[in-house]
Image (cartoon, helix red, strand yellow):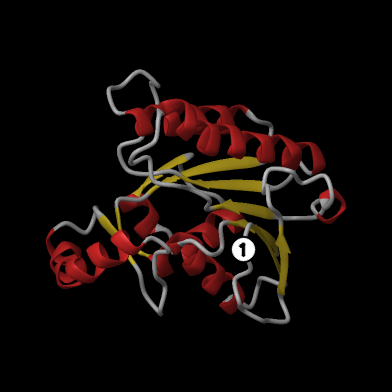
């Protein structure tokens, strides 16, 4: 498979990239982002773009991609709804519309979050915007599209958040992950399982287009 990955330097994207590079069935990984990953691998092609939604210079490389894993995202803390919508909904949809025009046969996987509001009318701003993004993606004529809604994600294999606050939170929460896996397995997954689950849906799909933590963990 040939995989296109957005957001490979983020916590989720790091885990997804690792699993793609380890998977014998993945022959090429194209990473698009604002910063390089710092990795080298025969499978890996990195494209650094100031605006990852402007794919005009690389459209020719996207016509034979089998799946896109869209892991770009920012925290909504301190952001207005207009600003958050611009970097969440608008950036994602601009890129997705180009991709579906280049190659509608690919599978598109979007990393959303637990609590996303599909009605787009709830009280939580981030959940409304994520819900609007999911709904718009599901209307595009990709071969298939899946919305991943993880809850707690345990970073493994050296994966770490770019945000200092999140790194401190994860360091403090590390002892709790074992308890969560035991007592609330449907609420916690790992960076490793996120990557493996995306590869599963790219290969053979999933029973439903919206996948919560339990559904992500069930994909093997």
Q: Position of residue 114 (x, y in %)?
A: 32, 43
Residue at the image point whose x is 39% and y is 27% from the top: 128
Q: Position of residue 209 (x, y in %)?
A: 48, 39
Q: Position of residue 91 (x, y in %)?
A: 60, 38
Residue 161 relative to residue 172: left or right: right
Residue 29 relative to residue 84: left or right: right
Residue 123 relative to residue 119: left or right: left
Residue at the image point whose x is 48% and y is 61% from the top: 10
Residue 66 relative to residue 132: left or right: right
Q: Quadrant of residue 98?
A: top right
What residue is pinned by disc 1?
35
Outermost right residue:
60
Quadrant containing the C terminus is bottom left
Judging depth in this view, the residue of 40 and 145 nearest the camera is 40
Residue at the image point whose x is 21% and y is 59% from the top: 185
Residue 142 visible in the shown view = no
- Is 133 rendered above or below residue 171? above
Residue 115 visible in the shown view = yes
Judging depth in this view, the residue of 119 and 183 nearest the camera is 119
Outermost top residue:
121
- Is 148 rendered above or below residue 158? above
- Is 172 rendered above or below residue 128? below
Q: Quadrant of residue 118?
A: top left
Give the mark count. 1
Judging depth in this view, the residue of 10 and 164 nearest the camera is 164
Q: Position of residue 165 (x, y in %)?
A: 29, 60
Q: Secondary structure at mark 1?
A: loop
Quadrant containing the N terminus is bottom right
Q: Residues within 10 Å of mark 1 (few under 14, many from 20)?
A: some
């Amino acid at each position: 498979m040939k995989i296109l990955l957005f957001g490979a330097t983020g916590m989720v994207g790091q885990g997804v990239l690792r699993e793609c590079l380890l998977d014998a069935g993945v022959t090429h990984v194209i990473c698009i982002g604002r910063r390089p990953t710092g990795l080298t691998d025969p499978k890996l092609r990195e494209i650094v773009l100031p605006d990852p939604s402007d794919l005009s210079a690389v459209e020719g490389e996207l016509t034979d991609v089998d799946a896109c894993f869209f892991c770009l995202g920012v925290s909504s803390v301190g952001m207005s709804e207009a600003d958050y919508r611009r970097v969440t909904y608008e950036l994602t949809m601009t890129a997705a519309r180009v991709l579906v025009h280049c190659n509608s046969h690919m599978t598109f996987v979007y990393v959303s979050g637990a609590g996303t509001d599909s009605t787009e009318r709830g009280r939580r701003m981030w959940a409304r915007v994520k819900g609007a993004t999911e709904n718009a993606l599901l209307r595009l004529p990709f071969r298939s599209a899946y919305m991943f809604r993880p809850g707690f994600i345990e970073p493994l294999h050296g994966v770490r958040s770019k945000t200092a606050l999140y790194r401190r939170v994860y360091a403090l929460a590390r002892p709790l992950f074992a308890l969560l896996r035991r007592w609330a397995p449907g609420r916690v997954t790992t960076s490793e399982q996120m990557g493996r689950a995306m590869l599963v849906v790219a290969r053979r799909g999933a029973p439903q287009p919206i996948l919560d933590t339990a559904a992500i963990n069930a994909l093997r």
